[in-house]
Amino acid sequence: MSSGPSSDQAAAAAAAFAAIPPLDKMSLVAIWVETLLYGINIVMYLGAAYVLVGNGKRRGPTIVPYALLIASTLLFTLSTGHVAVSLRQLLQAFTNPAVTSVPKGSSLYFLNQTDPLVFAGQALYLFNVLVQDLVLIWRLYAVYNSDWRVPILPLILEAINQVTALYSIVKFFHGTALEDPILRKYGILSWSLHLIINIGVTAAIAVKIWWHGRRTVTIRGHNAYAGVAFTIMESGGLFAGATFVLYVFFINTSTGTDALVGVSPVTQLATLSPLLIITRVGFGLTHSGGRSQLSSGRVAPSHNEAVHVNITRSQVSDYASGDLYPMQAVKSESAMDA
C-alpha cells in the first residue's frame, strides 16, 4: 500500500522533469541574437553621438543635445552590461561542471530565478526599459509644446509598470515559484502597461507631427511631415513589436519562461529604438513619398515653436528636446500653434 503514493510521486516528478523546456538551446539562440543586436547598437550609438555632439556645437549654449547624449550613453552602457551578464550565464550553464554534470543541468540553470546573474539581467532590462520610456515620454512632452499635462498619464503608467515588474523579479529572486498566480497577474499587468506606453506614446508623437504637416499639402501637394511620422512609427515599432511577442509568450505558458528567455535580445532593442531614431533623422534618412531620402539641411534654433519649416529647407523639430526630424526643401514657412 505504501508504494502507491511514492510511485505516483515519482511518476509526477519524472513527468515534470520531462516537461522542462529546452531552455539551454532557447537561451543560446536568444543570446546569440542579442550579440548581433549589440553589434548594431555599437554602430548606432557612435552615429547618435556624432549627431548629438554636432547638433550641440551648432546650436550653441543649450543643454538638451548633451542631455540626450547622456541618455543614449546610459542606454548603451546598460545594454553592454546586459550582454556581459548573458555571456557570463552562458559560461556558467555550459562550462561549469556542477551544472553540466546534472541531467538537463543547463536548462535547469536558466530556469533558476534565484541565480544572481538572472536577477542582474532582469534588473538591467527593467532599468533599460525605464530610460527608453522616459526618453519617449520626454519627446512627447516636447512635441506637444511642452504642455506639462500631456505626460502625466504616461508617467503614472510607467511608475505602475516599473513597480509591479520590480516587485515580481525580487519575489522570484527570493524563491517564489514562476507559477505563482499573483505574480502572473502582476506580470500580465506590467507587460500590458509596457505595450500601452510604447504604442500609445509613439503613435501620439507621430500623429501630432503628421497633423501639423497637413499645412504643407496646399504648398507641395502632399503632407511634408508624413515621412517623419512614418520614420518614428517604424523605428519605435521595432521595440513595441518585440514586446508584444514577449507578452504573447508570457500569457500562453504557465511559467512565462519563453518570455523571460526573450528578454535578452529585447533589451538590446530597447537601446536600439531611440538610437535608431536619432541616427536616422540626424543624417536625414527619413521616408518621404514612399522612399528614403538623405537631407543635410539644418534649421536655425527657435525657442517659441515646436515645429518649424524653414524658408529654404524644412525640418520638424521639437526644440524643447533638441531632436531634429529633417525634411526636404519647402518654399514656405509654417509654425505650430502654441
Image (cartoon, grey):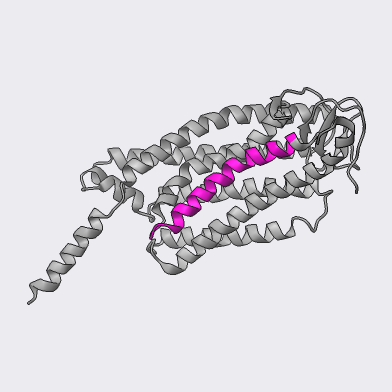
Residue 58 position in % (x across, y down): 82, 27
Instruction: Pick out the residue farthest to the bottom.
Output: 1
Image quarter in which the N terminus is found: bottom left
Residue 158 visible (yes or no): yes
Q: Which SS does the magenta portion mostly show?
A: helix
> In the visual, does 21 lie left or right of 214?
left
Region rendered in magenta: 227-255
Residue 162 visible (yes or no): no
Residue 126 position in % (x across, y down): 54, 51
Tell which of 155 and 225 is nearer to you: 225
- Looking at the image, which residue is at 81% across and 34% down? 222
68 magenta-colored: no
Q: Is residue 286 above or below residue 182?
A: above
Residue 195 position in % (x across, y down): 59, 53
Q: Is residue 10 above or below residue 331?
A: below
Residue 111 position in % (x across, y down): 35, 52
| Residue 50 quadrant | top right
Tell which of 261 and 64 is nearer to you: 261
> In the visual, does 194 lie left or right of 121?
right
